[in-house]
Amino acid sequence: MAYFSQQLINAITLGAIYGLIAIGYTMVYGIIGMINFAHGDIFMIGAFISLIGFLICAALGINSAPLAIVLVLLMAMAFTAVYGWAIERTAYRPLRGSFRLAPLISAIGVSILLENYVQLAQGARPKPGGGSIVTGGFTLFSSDGFDVRVTWLQIVIVVVTVVLMAGFTWLIASTSLGRRQRACEQDMKMASLLGVNVDRTISLTFVMGAALAAVAGMLFLMYYGVVDFFIGFLAGIKAFTAAVLGGIGSLPGAMLGGLAIGLIEVFWAGYFSSEYKDVAVFAILVLVLIFRPSGLLGKPEIEKV
Amino acid sequence: MLEVRGIATFYGAIQALHGVDLDVAKGEIVTLIGANGAGKSTLLMTICGSPRARSGSVKLEGRDITALPTHEIVRLGVAQVPEGRRIFPRMTVFENLQMGATLVDPTHFQRDLDRVFAMFPRLAERREQRGGTLSGGEQQMLAIGRALMSRPRLLLLDEPSLGLAPLIVRQIFEAIRRIAREEGVTIFLVEQNAFHALRLADRGYVLVNGRVLMNGTGKELLANPEVRAAYLEGGHA
């Protein structure tokens, strides 16, 4: 029971990070129907910018952890959002109206470009840092000589995620911007006939997805204490799996899918084998694609006549 | 108000409009009738800049809008009730109306909403229902209401009677008449239902294979034997 509880706590933490990344996939898919395969690398960029941010904070002598986190968070979101905007502008927008695979191939190109650019600029070795910003924790309970521990960082991760997701859900459901995004998602041409600037709305969707990926990047950095140029690949594919599992295009689906992937990965590693945890995750992707292609909360694709 | 000169529009290599000229004066109701595939919807969409005309010009109150992006044209006071209504299916009736008011100063919202609900009380009853679950007639009311929320000066309607029961068609046409006569909105109405459209309209144009073949007042066209043979005989609502 103690072991199970400990794994559950770890799984929720990991699932929160996947969920944050998955939102970017699902939103972009919802609005322009493409899988932004560079999104995982946006997350990686976010983690690197966070690392640089923490180093700057340390150099400036900012010792208060909450202050440093807020500063780095804002900085990472801002810079990463610029990346998201620029990628959409240069790699995807010129291909809109082209055949369906074109932006997908372009996205893979951007992904390779970002990985190599960071590898060149930052080196290929893993960079440690950010792991000692929030330390400590408390023992939830003990049984069978096993302490179930919750770290403060895990609480920070879950709280930040829940707050952001709640805010985001509200933004999409109740604000004018969210309504414009949903209008573009449902009928782009009609949205433009009502005066919506479709190009700008799509740009903003990329910006919002990238900002959330930056948050995930910072939390990842703080959780694992190390980054390298390749973290975006695996995390990105897993978050994509989360988005598909939850039902791509569905916001609550992305959050649920993220949680599910976190649970599968951690429990597989905890009870079976940690070497095969990724296999377990991707086996789930295969099963979902076979038996429920629209995902847990997705709506089945209806061909319009 | 609206001045269309020599518009030619293509879909790929296929030419849909072959140099269309027409005018709509302020406060008028003008109708464009024609068979399926004549290019009626293409003309309405070309006026809104999507697809764009390959040659010719569209002027709105003297200003050339041929090259403007769609959302800029809409900003100038043009609203469209498009073919197939294009209600946002996963938004409520209220949200659809909010979308109509995208470009409007929010202080007008409540009054405009009350006006639309007064014109179509059914929409008030269905306020929180999703657009996709409405009946065809209700969707048409919503499409017109949504267009009105943008406070248009020129309202373009694409076959508002299509697929609706005769009783609902009469309601819709009555609403269009009121929008024009009581609110002073200029109306350009594209219809296959030539009888109703010509009776309502001040003037009409007949579009055949992407060309304007005839024009005249509604009464003249209604009396014209060719128009009668092509568009009116053989059953009208």
Image (tube, rainbow, N blue to C red):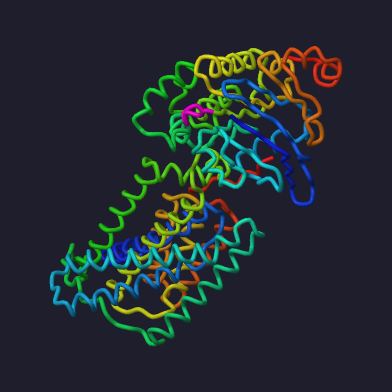
Counting labels gives 0
Task: State the residue at coordinates (35%, 67%).
Answer: A79
**Residue B68, position as x, y percentages in the image:** 57, 46
- Where is residue B83, by image quadrant? top right
Which of B112/A213 is in front?
Answer: B112
Magenta part of the chain: B148-153
Q: Which of A255 and B194 is in front in this view?
A: B194
Say which quadrant the N terminus of chain A sits in: bottom left
* Residue A263 seen in render: no
Which quadrant, please, contains the C terminus of chain A?
top right
The answer to whether B122 appears left or right of B33 in the picture is left
B36 with respect to B126 (left or right)? right
Q: Position of residue B128 (x, y in %)?
A: 43, 28
Q: Which residue is drawn at 47% across and 28% down?
A: B151
Q: Residue A304 in the image: x percent, y percent? A: 66, 41
Could you say which is closer to the camera, residue A37 or residue B22?
B22
* Magenta highlight on residue B69: no
> Is B149 contained in the magenta span?
yes
Where A181 falls versus B175 (above or below)? below
Q: Is residue A230 above or below residue A243?
A: below
Q: Nearer the viewer, residue A96 or A171?
A: A96
In the rendered structure, the answer to whether residue B53 lies left or right of residue A173 reads: right
| The quarter of the displayed image where residue B209 is located | top right
Image coords of residue A217 (percent x, y) = 35, 69
Most frequent secondary structure within the magenta stretch: loop
Question: Can see residue A57?
Answer: yes
